[in-house]
Amino acid sequence: MTALRHSPAPDAPYDLRRGHSLWHRLATDTRYTLLGLPAALLHFAVVVAGVSAGLGAAVVFIGLPILAATAAAARNLADFERVALPGVLGRPVARPPYPPAPAWAGWFRRTMNPLANGQAALDLLYGVIAFPISLAASVVAAVWWTGALAGLTFPLYGWIIAALPGVDQTLPELLGLGGDDTTFVVFNTAIGVVFALTLVPVVRGAALVKASLAQAMLTRAPAPFADRMTAG
């Protein structure tokens, strides 16, 4: 007795997968841009405060341990960024090696070990450079989401705004499109449609700008799959 195999209809599941993938991509990029701002602010604050304190106290003994502690903190904050990168870039990333202190090292060498790696400078520099870029990316994402949501729902409340006292010189009227309430509502709704239609590529672009910087400064190229294969 043979078992019957049911093949799914090719078109509908494919369309559903495309829609799910699109929303998943938008959600991932939005989360990365908006939630990445507090992390970037923390990274920036830690690096600026730590490096300033360390350099200011460099003439005394305590300055170097402060710089080492700042480098260690920047490394941990960079790890959070690395965790988010595969979801945005769509491919794995590799963490740069951070060699431990040698077994023979004394306490001072172990304390200063976070500064003994060249990647430490990139982790610190990333905290300074990434903050304004993360701020710009989050602002762009927030503006486009606000424009899309406010515009698409404008027919629900736009009539109330149009009826408010003092709302006479509207943008449609200044553009010569008319000053009636219907034109006002339709015009702002159309703007919302434009924001909605461009939401995915704009948020995607904002996320990729930030992620590309993080990839360049905080990661190294993963080993090719063929190199990781072992003969069996």
Image (cartoon, grey):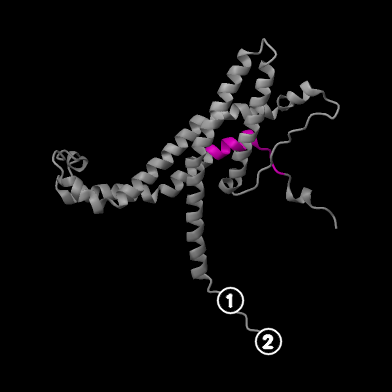
What's the residue at 79%, 29% (across, down)? Answer: 101
Front-lying residue, 44 or 110: 110
Q: Tell me the quarter of the image containing the C terminus.
A: bottom right
Q: Residue furthest top?
A: 59
What's the residue at 34%, 45% (across, down)? Answer: 147
Q: Of the residues shown, which amino acid type is indicated by label 2?
A: Thr
* Mark 1, residue position: 7
Q: Is residue 56 visible?
A: yes
**Is 96 positioned to the left or the right of 207 in the image?**
right
What's the residue at 23%, 50% (across, down)? Answer: 157
Q: Secondary structure at mark 2?
A: loop
**Is 215 positioned to the left or the right of 189 in the image?**
right
* Mark 2, residue position: 2
What's the residue at 58%, 44% (across, down)? Answer: 84
Front-lying residue, 85 or 177: 85
Crowding at mark 2 (Cα within 10 Å: few <14, some 14-19, many 20+): few
